[in-house]
Image (cartoon, rainbow, N blue to C red):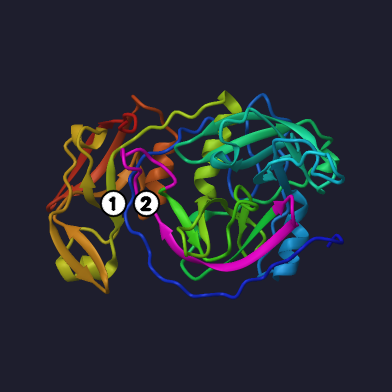
Amino acid sequence: MQKGDVIRVLGTVVAAGVGAGLALGGAAITGHLDGSTTIERFGATSSAPVASTVPSGGNLSVQDIYRQDAPGVVQISNGPVPAVAAGVQASEELGSGFVIDKAGHIVTSNLVLGDARKVKISFSGNDRIDATVVGKDPATDVAVLEVNAHSRSLSPLPLGDSDEVQVGDPVVAIGNSLSMQRTATLGIVSAVQHGIDAPNGAPAVAHSIQTDAAIDRGNSGGPLINTRGQVIGVSSRVGSAGETGGFAIPIDIVKSVVAQLIDTGKVVHPYLGINAVPVDASLARSFGLPCTYGLIVQSVTPGTAAAGAGLRPGSTPVVVAGESYLIGGDIIVAANGVPVTREAQLREVIQTMKPGDRLSLEIWRGRKKESVRVTLGRPPG
C-alpha cells in the first residue's frame, strides 16, 4: 500500500429486500466478455485480448482486495493539477474509473462524465493523462474512456459474474479521490434490484445492485468488488438523502454495453417489454403449474414487442414463502432454443440481438405448450 493511501472500513449493517422481476430490454452485443477474461473481443480498435488473473477460490481480505485491485482504479477530473500553492487553480473532481484491458480502456459511470468529451485521469494523484471519451450510454449509466499509456503501466481488473450476486454478500467499493487518494469501503449487498424501469419504460440504472458500502462522489464510477477480487458492478449512484451506501450497475450489463461502445461508439437497445420472475419449486407444487422452471410473466408494457406478440401476464395474486407472484399468465421456458430458469438468461439472449430481430419464445399457456415469435423493438421513449 502506498503511503498516503487511505482505507476507510465501514461497519457492516445487514439490510434485506430483494427486487423481483425483470423489464427485459438489453444492450445488443457486438463484442463479448465473460467472467474468466477481462475482454474476449472488443473489435478492431483493441489490441489482443488480455486475461486478468482471477483468484482460484477462497475469500480475500479487504487488504488483499485493495492491494490487488487498487492500482487499476483511476481518478477522473476535468481541470489542471490540484492546487499546491497560492494562485494555482484546483481541478474539479468528477469521480473514479477502472482499467479493463491493456489497450487503455477505462470504465466509469456516465453520470460521472456528464457532458465531458475529454477528461484527465490519474493513477497516483500526481501525473495526469489526457483521456478521450470512447462512448457513453445514459440508459445504463455506463461510459468508456481511452488513454494512450504503455501496457506495462496498466493493471486491468478481473471481471466477475453479477448474476451470482446475492443479498448479504460482502463487497468492497474502491475509489480514487483527489482529496484522499484511493479509498476502500466495506459493506454488503443490500438488494438486487432487477426489473425497475425508468419512468418512460426505458432500461435504466434500474437493474442495479444496492449496497450499504459508502458510495460518494469520489468513488462513483469505480468498481464494486466481491471477495474474490472480481468486479461485480460499477458504482453509480449515491443513496437518497439520509441514507448510506448507494447503487452499482451489474457487471454483466456493463460487459455487453462496453463491448458495443468500443466497437461502434454507441449502444442500440433491443426491448421485449415484460416483467417476469423465476418459477419457484414450492410455487409450482402449491398451484400445480405445468412446469418446474421458467419465467412467469408478471406484466406486459403496452405498445412493446411483447404486447404485439400477445404475451399474457398473470392476474391472480398469490404469496409463497413471503414472496408475491401473479400467476395465470404465460410461463417462458426457452428463448431461441435456450432454456431459461433465471431472468439473466433471457436477458443475455436478448442482448445478442438488435431491434427488428425475431425472438423465438417457448411458453406454457395454461396446460398447453406453444411457440411465440416476437419482433424486438426499442425502449419506449
**Up-down: is 134 above or below 327?**
above
Q: Are marks 1 and 2 in contact (CB under 8 Å)?
A: yes
**Up-down: is 170 above or below 156?**
below
Q: Which stretch is magenta?
A: 176-205
Residue 301, image quadrant: top left
The residue lying toward the viewer, choosing from 360 and 11, is 11
- Residue drawn 73% across and 46% down? 74
**Up-down: is 26 above or below 162?**
above
Helix, strand or loop at mark 1: strand
The image shows residue 297 at horizontal and vertical percentages of: 23, 50
Helix, strand or loop at mark 2: helix
- Asked whether the viewer can see residue 31, the reply is no
Determine which residue is flagged by label 1: 276
Is residue 179 magenta-colored? yes
Is residue 150 magenta-colored? no
Q: Identify the image quadrant of the C terminus.
A: top left
The image shows residue 380 at horizontal and vertical percentages of: 30, 32
Q: Amino acid at mark 2?
A: Glu
- Residue drawn 79% across and 30% down? 148
Residue 50, image quadrant: top right
The residue lying toward the viewer, choosing from 171 and 247, is 247
Q: Mark 2 or mark 1, which is nearer the start of the sequence? A: 1
- Asked whether the viewer can see residue 213, the reply is yes
In space, the residues marked 1 and 2 are separated at their CA atoms by 7 Å
Q: Residues within 10 Å of mark 1 (few under 14, many from 20)?
A: many
Q: Spot the residue most to the front.
A: 86
Locate residue 150 relative to residue 77 in the image: left or right: right
Q: How many marks?
A: 2
Q: Residues within 10 Å of mark 2 (few under 14, many from 20)?
A: many
The image shows residue 92 at horizontal and vertical percentages of: 69, 41
Determine which residue is flagged by label 2: 343
Q: Amino acid at mark 1?
A: Ala
